[in-house]
Amino acid sequence: MTSINGPALDALTPTFGGELITPDDAAYDAARQVWNGDIQRRPALIARCRGTADVVAAVKFCQEQGLQASVRGGGHAVAGTAVIDDGVVIDLSLMRGTHVDTAAQTITAQGGCLNADLDREAQLHGMAVTGGFISHTGIGGLTLGGGIGHLMRKFGLTIDALRSAEVVTANGDVVTASEDENADLFWGLRGGGGNFGVVTNFTFGLQPVGPTVLAGMIAWPADQAPAVLAFLRDFIATAPDEVGLIGNLRLAPPLPAMPADLHGKPIVALVATYAGPVKEGEQVLRPLREFGTPVVDLIMPKPYAMHQKALDIALPHGRHYYWRSHKLGPLTDEIIAILCEHLGRVTSPMSTVGIFCFGGAVGRVPVDATAFANRDASHDVNIVAAWLPEQAADAARHRAWVREFWAALEPFSRGVYVNFTSDDAADRVRLAYTPEQWARLTAVKAAYDPTNFFRLNANISPG
Ligand code: FAD
């Protein structure tokens, strides 16, 4: 393992105001962990930045010393691209400040913010950014790849809410990217991932949401899964934009809300969000709540910020994870049969399949407006295997379940969501974009990062 110390580190310390963590420090082992406990990399240095000046210092230091770097936002990338063996982690986890401008109806958030940081401040004013489903995901990676969440059918993807970004480029310059300044970079940042620089500040448009929304989970036993998934297909096809919906397949977790006789048995669940008046939502969601014989119905008025945390428990830090994903069209009977068959073969009680519903505002943005393709897809299905660190001997079995499930759905694939790539990123990154978008992205990469300094990501080479 490489360590950076002595004279090399002396070149950074005078210009760096954050924390520098080396393998000799007590904080090192905790600092190199990411969300996926299966990733165990050993960086030579973790540079925890406090602000833009620290990011500039870290980038210049790496360039001058010829060191490879990774960029860490919330640490959620399942492939662990936030951490690098023997290189420098440019760690933004101390950069979690936000500022709401109520007059402009915008929020500016530092590059290391998590979804929860934005929800907390924006909800003070009854507003929200269309963001992710889990409160502890970083807005850095989430935004740069697209950003899907409960509000996307009403307000679009997170990139559709982005107004501007402050970016530290590969040579250490600080630039603003917006429709008016460096518009090519601004376009690339909206879907092209962390390829073009470190975003130190994002400014998003806010939308009125809640603070109380009608939302929650409703579940049926797996014998009703084919009918529930067919219902989901038909219901979402005509549902108003206010309806956010996720299908979920898994073994029932041993939670108090779940009937005890169902624990460990396969279930199909829907997680609904109504981004409008609660009374209206009660009417709109009634057919869903009256469908079949649900065993649990937790849909109720609740604070939006609380709903944003409701799924956190299903995907905690530190478990070992592996996943694969496809964008899909409408859930045909053939697709439903595959989903139900592979639910029946699930290998771990912690594994879970999310079927996220696009539509509404997502599909109304022209495809060339941002670097996000297949906006007309109906769903993204993400097949997630999870197991405990002490169960590592079973990892191959859990991964095989994901791969076989994913391969069965491949004939129906409508492309790739770059934020849901894993060990397939290098092979499939091009499928996340149209050929025109890919050509444009490689040109932006060549302009802002010609040596591919930012390469630990779903990489777009400079051409
Ligand atoms: P990190 O691992 O820190 O970063 C991933 C990559 O993003 C880095 O390698 C770097 O290239 C880049 N990056 C991060 N921050 C910056 C920055 N400020 N500037 C430049 N580059 C940066 N996606 C959704 O769209 N919606 C969801 O609801 C959603 N939920 C998720 C829930 C869980 C539990 C997990 C694990 C992932 C989820 N994702 C979701 C996927 C998520 O968007 C990606 O994993 C994303 O990369 C996470 O960003 P991060 O900053 O947390 O990750």
Image (spheres, rainbow, N blue to C red):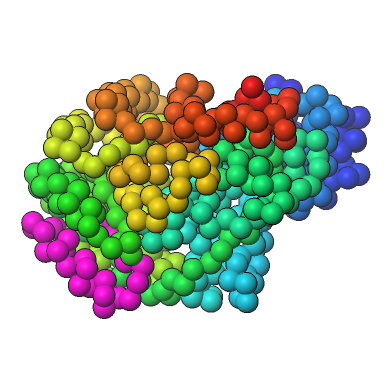
Q: Nearer the viewer, residue 9 or 329?
A: 329
202 relative to 213, above or below = above
Q: Residue at x 24, y 42 (%)?
A: 330
- The quadrant in which the N terminus is found is top right
Q: Residue at x 44, y 67 (%)?
A: 305
Left or right of 15? Residue 250 is left
Q: Residue at x 56, y 64 (%)?
A: 205
**Residue 107 position within the rendered picture, expressed as x and y whole percent measured from the top left:** 61, 65
268 relative to 7, above or below = below
**Residue 226 position within the rendered picture, expressed as x and y whole percent measured from the top left:** 12, 43
Residue 382 showing in the rendered view: no
Q: Residue at x 11, y 64 (%)?
A: 290
The magenta region covers: 271-295
Task: Give yes or no for residue 175 being in the magenta stretch.
Answer: no
Task: Give yes or no for residue 285 being in the magenta stretch.
Answer: yes
15 relative to 45, above or below = below
**Residue 277 position within the rendered picture, expressed as x and y whole percent measured from the top left:** 33, 76
**Residue 263 position within the rendered picture, expressed as x and y whole percent measured from the top left:** 19, 48
Q: Nearer the viewer, residue 185 or 2?
A: 185
Left or right of 382? Residue 319 is right
> Looking at the rendering, which quadrant does residue 400 occupy?
top left
